[in-house]
Amino acid sequence: MTSSRAARRAFAFLTALSSVAGAARAAVFKDFAVPTPASAPTGIGGAGLIDPTVGGVWFTEFEANRISRIAEDGTIVEYPLATPSSGPAAIAQYPTSIGRIGFTEAKANKIAYVQPPGGVVDFAIPTPGSNPRGVAPGSDQTIWFTEFDGNKIGVLDFQGRITEYAIPIPHSGPLGITSSSGSDIWFTEFKGNKIGRIDGQGVVREYPLPTPASGPTAIVAGPNAEFWFTMFHANKIGRISQDGTITEFPLPTPDSGPTGIVARPDGIWFTESRANKIGRWNRDGTFTEFPILTPNSWPAAINGDLWFT
């Protein structure tokens, strides 16, 4: 979902939400302006995406063609990419022991990684115009990614080889993707209105969502071996169990456009792009929403430390 519209809105800030108790009045927001104007910061590293060799949280600048890092004090360092207008989108990190940070280059049709201090290495995806979007680290030093227009799930191994797995239904629009402690990779089908699952042998299983045309967007591994996802058009977040049981939760604010999502011990957090809020599903089944002070900021990705673009 978010590619073209998110880019057009030209995000101006990277933001941190801190000091959250239980009520909206306890939320403290801090905004940090990205040095490059109209850079469209889009993807941000997941919980704990901190490289001990350089520090900071990594994020992508979709329109500025950069991978960047922000320190806890708000200092931002930007790294221009060698491929012109590559459109860096999602970003994720290998385990710290490996030290690589993988990301997708949506416009250049590549999958890449940065390994400080060695710079960026990228790989052309075999399917032309595949529009790679989501990215997630595998358990065996691989990077998994979605091909929104290629209708495939791809994986880059440690030797630089790419393998692609076609999704059974054409034009399903795979978008978000996540890994877990197991070997399976889970993903959303934005156009196909399904949650997908691919195992280590490349076998794809799909689970249709109860709400038609719901626009499943981001997905994350949660507690109890379940997975949580946003439903952009349906104005809901959803949960799917290992056996494919799906539960949907309508959001309090109409037409809020839930986009990014992350699981934390205190609940499931998500961005509400259209409503300009950060939301939380609490363990008791209720919702808490936190209005963002910057008007029309269109919050997109969010990580486990509550940094968001």
Image (cartoon, rainbow, N blue to C red):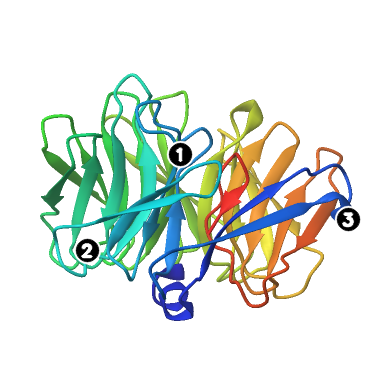
> Disc 3 on helix, strand or loop?
helix
Number of marks in the rendered image: 3
| Residue 82 percent coordinates (x, y) | 14, 58
Residue matched to label 3? 25
Residue 1 visible in the current orientation: no
Q: Earlier in the sequence, mark 3 or mark 2?
A: 3
> Disc 2 on helix, strand or loop?
loop
Please tell me the numbered disc located at residue 56: 1
The residue drawn where x is 17% and y is 29% is 158
Cβ atoms at labels 3 and 2 below 8 Å apart: no
Q: Earlier in the sequence, mark 1 or mark 3?
A: 3
The residue drawn where x is 53% and y is 36% is 47
Which of these two is toward me, 117 or 231? 117
* Above or below 117: residue 145: below
From the viewer's perspective, tell me whether residue 247 is left or right of residue 9: right
From the viewer's perspective, tell me whether residue 86 is left or right of residue 180: left
Please tell me the numbered disc located at residue 130: 2
| Residue 83 percent coordinates (x, y) | 14, 61
